[in-house]
Image: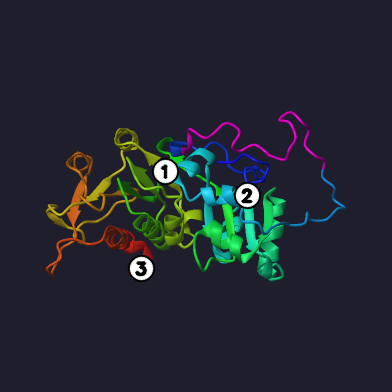
Amino acid sequence: MSKAPTGLYRRSKGGGGPRPGPNAGAKPGAGAPHDGRGADAPARSARPDAGPAPAKEVTSLSNPLVKDLRGLHSKKERAETGLFLAEGLKLVADAIEQNWPIRTLVHAVKVREQPMVRRIADAARACGALVVEVSDDVLVKISRRDNPQMVVAAFEQRLLSLDDIDPSGTTVWVALEGIKDPGNLGTILRTVDSVGATGAILIGDTTDPFALEAVRATMGSIFHVPLAAGTMAEFAAWKAKHRVPVVGTHLKGAVDYRSIAYPEPVVLLMGNEQSGLPDAYVELCDHVVKIPMAGRADSLNLAIATAVMLYEIRRPRLGL
């Protein structure tokens, strides 16, 4: 990826911190300012009387910034830079409101006068982000869609380690082993948010939660749901350390999912789309339940099964 002084890698004020997990191998200097000055140059002093900086305007498809933003469709580039793309005015505004570290805000020239666009542009500048106005052709190239959203932004990734999680109190975590489909993952994160569960844990080799398809499927919940990642060994050690009950789902489970009282804290452990929960993970479970099938289908889509389980676990608190 080009490291031209496009501003994409400018770190927003107060944002980010270390990114454990898949971002541990970030390129040196990927989060440092790229404004043409040396690394040891003093920061420019603020000029309170100067007003907000004007937006940078980009109309050329060959602009290095376009290449950098388009590159974030690649898992490799997301891992190396620690950044990801989010699309849509409401979603981006919600992320900024949640103080999610933003690096670059891009919007179509034709929406510059919309009040909400102006508000988020001002908020992004206040965070130290680059604000860019682009032509429709540039938006199409960045988003890789024929009918792109009018607002796109590059944000810093946030991914916790299991050591960062204390599953005490009334917490409900969803642990996903080897989930492969970004749409399923995004839908599950949206469900976690909807039922008021605490967060999600990715175990083993999973799809990238910051892939654009996953981010789209969350409908903004990526900015509300704490997300952690770890290996099976780390998950087992974390469970043992905190003595948190784990409930798994399995077709061979002997207990109907509606027949037990779910404790809190609790971890709901779900297997992947292809093979379900492996035997080694079943051994970690305090309860193994099943969702009965009445028709010819012998299983549910992973996102749907997770939603069924979460609503049952949270039913007493949701008043259902």
Q: Quadrant of residue 293?
A: bottom left
Sequence order check, earlier mark of 2 and 1: 2
Q: Dividing the image into 4 quarters, which one contains the C terminus?
A: bottom left
According to the picture, the residue beneath numbered tag 2 turns out to be 65
Look at the image and say whether residue 42 sits in the magenta stretch.
yes
Q: Dividing the image into 4 quarters, which one contains the N terminus?
A: top right
**Residue at horizontal 59%, vertical 63%?**
137
Disc nearest the viewer among 1 and 3: 1
Any mark on residue 228, and which? Answer: 1
Query: In the current view of this chain or complex, which residue is farthest to the right?
Result: 49
Any mark on residue 319, and which? Answer: 3
What's the distance in space between the residues labelled 2 and 1, CA to CA? 30 Å
- Apparent side of residue 136 relative to residue 303 in the rendered image (left or right): right
**What range is drawn magenta here?**
23-45
The percent position of residue 161, horizontal first and vertical second, equals 43, 38
Look at the image and say whether residue 212 sits in the magenta stretch.
no
Going by the numbered disc 1, the residue's amino acid type is Ala
